[in-house]
Image (cartoon, rainbow, N blue to C red):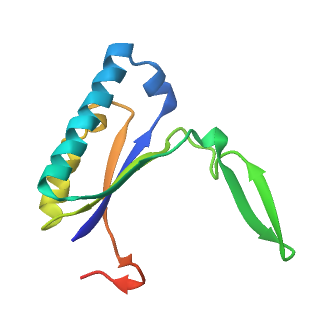
Amino acid sequence: MKFVISMHINPAMLDALTDDEKAAIGEGHGKFIQNLKDRGELILTQALVDPSQAAVVRIRNSQPVVTDGPFLEAKEYLGGFYLIDVEDKARALELAAQIPDAAIDGLGVEVRQVMFSDGQLEA
């Protein structure tokens, strides 16, 4: 079963962390990634740039309109994700609990099963 584990970030909370705490998060993700690779459960992981560097595209009057910045004005934004292939949801939840972000107030980890992959309905 494929799941996306997404990490939601509140920049104010992240900015409040010490350099040591930020380094510990990075090291924790490194260990987490290696564990997933060792078990053959990692498909892909990506970290995303700050939403201030995003662009939103909308079609208005049959023409694309591009706006700089995030889609929504919100405190939290999607910071990155892991795409994993595991036996069941229980394993996905177990893995999500190992992500360092899950232990920090103001940061969140969401687990969602993949419904479609490459145009095929997932089982």
Q: Is residue 68 left or right of residue 86?
A: right
Q: Residue at x 13, y 60 (%)?
A: 90
Spot the residue most to the bottom.
120
Which one is in front, 34 or 96?
Answer: 34
Residue 67 x %, y %: 77, 52
Residue 81 visible in rendering: yes
Residue 72 x %, y %: 62, 50
- Determine the image quadrant of residue 41: bottom left
Q: Is residue 68 left or right of residue 6?
A: right
* The C terminus lies in quadrant: bottom left
For the image, the number of numbered tags is 0
* The N terminus lies in quadrant: bottom left
Q: Residue at x 37, y 36 (%)?
A: 107
Residue 18 visible in rendering: no
68 relative to 16, above or below = below
- Determine the image quadrant of residue 103: top left
Q: Is residue 9 left or right of residue 36?
A: right
Which one is in front, 42 or 94?
Answer: 42
Q: Residue at x 74, y 65 (%)?
A: 58
Residue 80 x %, y %: 42, 47
Residue 69 x %, y %: 69, 45
25 relative to 9, above or below = above
Q: Is residue 80 left or right of residue 98?
A: right
